[in-house]
Image (cartoon, grey):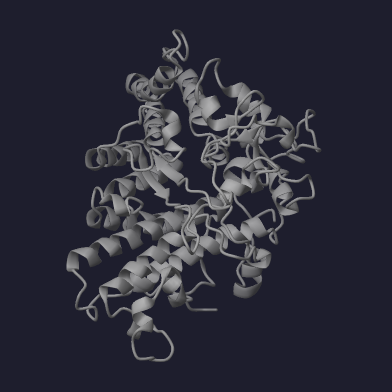
Amino acid sequence: MKKILVLITAIFAFGCTKQLEKVPQGQLTESNVFTQASDFILAIDAVYEPLTDRWRGSWDWDAGASICRDWVIGDVMSDDAVKGGGGLGDQEDMRRMETFAIFPTNNNVLGIWRYNYKGINAANVILLQDGSKAHDLDPSTFNRIKGEAYFLRAFYYFRLVVNFGDVPLLIPEKNLNDNSKRASVAEVYAQIEEDLQNAASALPASYPASDYQRATSGAAHALLAKTYLYREQWQKCLDEIALAQGVGNYSLLANYADNFNGSGEQGKEIIFAARHDAGKVPSQGSILNAVFAPRGIGWGFNLPTQDLVNEYETGDPRLKATVFMAGDTYFDGNPYDPSASLTGYCLKKLLGNFNPSDDGGIDYVYIRYADVLLWQAECYAQLNDLVNAKASLEMVRARARANAGVPGVLPPVVTTVKDDLLKAIQHERRVELAFEGQRYYDLIRWGLAATVLAKSPAADPLTGYKDYGDGWQSRNALLPIPQREVDLLGFGQNSGY
């Protein structure tokens, strides 16, 4: 286990017709794969694959399940959602995540580790190539593909470092191949910065519509801004946001809901998303469409809480775009049945009326411009530039106000007190970005997790509402290292587990 596992077979997950037409050459290796331009396209597509929520034919619980459950951490472990499903015993490992009774054997923890390293290994395969054996490979295309690989490696390492802290740093072009050694958080962030700078210089600002899902230079600057935000490097975050705005020409969609109903997937608000296409063979749709749909249509997981619903200001149209509730009509034209949910609410954002329900066609958004504007507002506020902070915040609120179409709804924030403005930004992030996997991480980086997710006398174990077990503890700032990795690789466990 001392060397990186090169997942060459992953390259062919999207097809290998031309290779099969050749004279059989025995086992596939790097030496006989990267011989034509199409091999590199297949290889970079494989690096994106762990970001998607496609059904892969087997749940594979022992290896972390068939999809990477980012939403379990970002949403279910926060005050925005409860596990849901068919009751307390349905997906017990998810229940343990939301009550902070997390063990290193939890398959959600293993899934986060497994899928991110799968992506890193696939990126490393490409970054070790020089392209010389593929005579039909255009140098500019090869440079762009390497830029995508740099971006995606950084993306996966960011998710690892925020969830686990010190992790093995596998960078084969630097001869860093030992996965039994955990690199420090500082070392991981330094590599993320380097990869994103390489990506930003190699990637285009946009693509043809057929390739809209690929990483851009604007996405690289935005992700680097997010890494600075998480480290409270406010000015550096603002600098990267400015660079993203300069190359990306981003803007908010006129209609907030269009970011999540499929119609705005190629719009200027989406900076980076995982692409899902329904009706393809093999399936390229999203299984989350079934996971989150109400019981009887889907499986009813990731249910909105009353606490989240209460957070929305009166008349805020983002509530209707995010949550199904009594009196609503479901996508199929039938009345929404609140009895299908333990909380009475079900998720609407990112879902649609697809048949079969586990082949959804809505992309999963990882970074969009409204999120970036709220980073910008937060950084300006932290630097005591309240005028610019309110200007960035107002752009987000103004769109919601226009969607409401009702005078007096969502008035501009006018406070001149820094702490009050930061609270307003925190509120706005919650309602604007609900169920986009941000809330739990926001609570941690704001130092609010121990208070918001404390043991509660209002806990309802039957629904999961406010049932955080004994409450969030400082050890929960990181997840445990999966026990399988500890046993195989021999490194230490995170503190408290």
Q: Considering the image in quadrants, where does the N terminus appear? A: bottom right
Residue 91 appearing in the image: yes
Residue placed at 23% from the left, 55% from the top?
201
Query: Which residue is at the far front?
Result: 333
Task: Find residue 427 and report its horizontal and vertical position in percent.
Answer: 52, 25
Task: Identify the image quadrant of residue 418.
Answer: top left
User: What is the x, y in percent for residue 375?
Assistant: 40, 34
In the image, taking residue 41 as reference, residue 168 lies left or right, namely: right
Q: Is residue 1 left or right of residue 149?
A: right
Residue at the spot x=62%, y=44% of the render?
Answer: 292
Rendered view: 352 above or below 254: below
Q: Does the image show residue 6? A: no
Measuring from the top left, give residue 191's x and y in whole percent.
Answer: 38, 59
366 on left or right of 248: right
Q: Nearer the viewer, residue 125 or 87?
A: 87
Q: Quadrant of the C terminus?
A: bottom right
Residue in the picture at 49% in, 34% down: 433
Judging depth in this view, the residue of 468 and 331 nearest the camera is: 331
